Amino acid sequence: MVDSDELAYKTIPELGALLRSRALSPMELLDATLARIKRRNPSLGAFVYLNEEYAYGQAKEAEQRLLAAERVEMQRIIAQERAELQAKRETMQKMLGERLAEIERAAAEDRATLEEDIRQNRPDIIVIDRVAFDWEAWARADPGLAEQLAAYRTAVSLERYVILQRR
């Protein structure tokens, strides 16, 4: 139980802070206050009539208002967090889109360079290292490069390497 003497000397703002932080409920505050009144009133005679039923009804309503305010605050926090996450998601999608565009540009440049290199130098063999990715599929995805590679056939296919030989 809460110390009623300690609460009696707290200011309204202090009690409000305790109630809002849920360190103290309205019902606990009322119980402590009524206990102090019952203990001290016989010698003080400060209260002629005490309507406990009404006071408990008011405390119950205050508790419900605090819970409702807490729910509203939680909903506000959730909405704010959701908006922040959506903004971060959009930023990440934009960054990923930009990065993908950079990679696609680099791949297109690499294909164009390779196509030009094969066209100009006409190598007898091309050695392909398949460890990182499917190079053949990547190369054949470009029509110009696929046209250049059509002049080659697979001479040797090993686990990691493929050797293309000019026909």
Image (cartoon, rainbow, N blue to C red):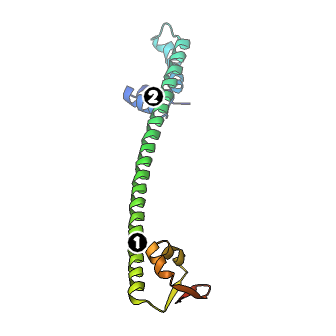
Q: Is residue 11 visible?
A: no
Foreground of the two, 156 or 6: 156
| Mark 1 residue element | helix
Q: Which residue is mark 1?
A: 108
Image point 47% across, 27% down: which residue?
A: 5
Mark drawn on residue 7: 2
Instruction: Give coordinates of residue 163: x percent, y percent.
Output: 55, 88
Foreground of the two, 12 or 163: 163
Image point 40% across, 48% down: which residue?
A: 87
Residue type at mark 1: give it: Ala
Q: Is residue 161 visible?
A: yes
| Mark 2 residue element | helix
Foreground of the two, 30 or 66: 66
Image vertical order of residue 109 relative to residue 16, above or below: below
Instruction: Give coordinates of residue 63: x percent, y percent.
Output: 51, 25
Foreground of the two, 114 or 85: 114
Residue type at mark 2: give it: Leu
Instruction: Give coordinates of residue 78: x percent, y percent.
Output: 47, 40
Instruction: Give coordinates of residue 68: x percent, y percent.
Output: 49, 27
Where, by quadrant of the figure, is residue 98 drawn?
Answer: bottom left
Would residue 11 appear left or right of 52 to someone viewing this image?
A: left
Dot 1 alpha-carbon crowd within 10 angstroms: few under 14, some 14 to 19, many 20 or more: some
Image vertical order of residue 90 relative to residue 141, above or below: above
Where, by quadrant of the figure, is residue 9 drawn?
Answer: top left
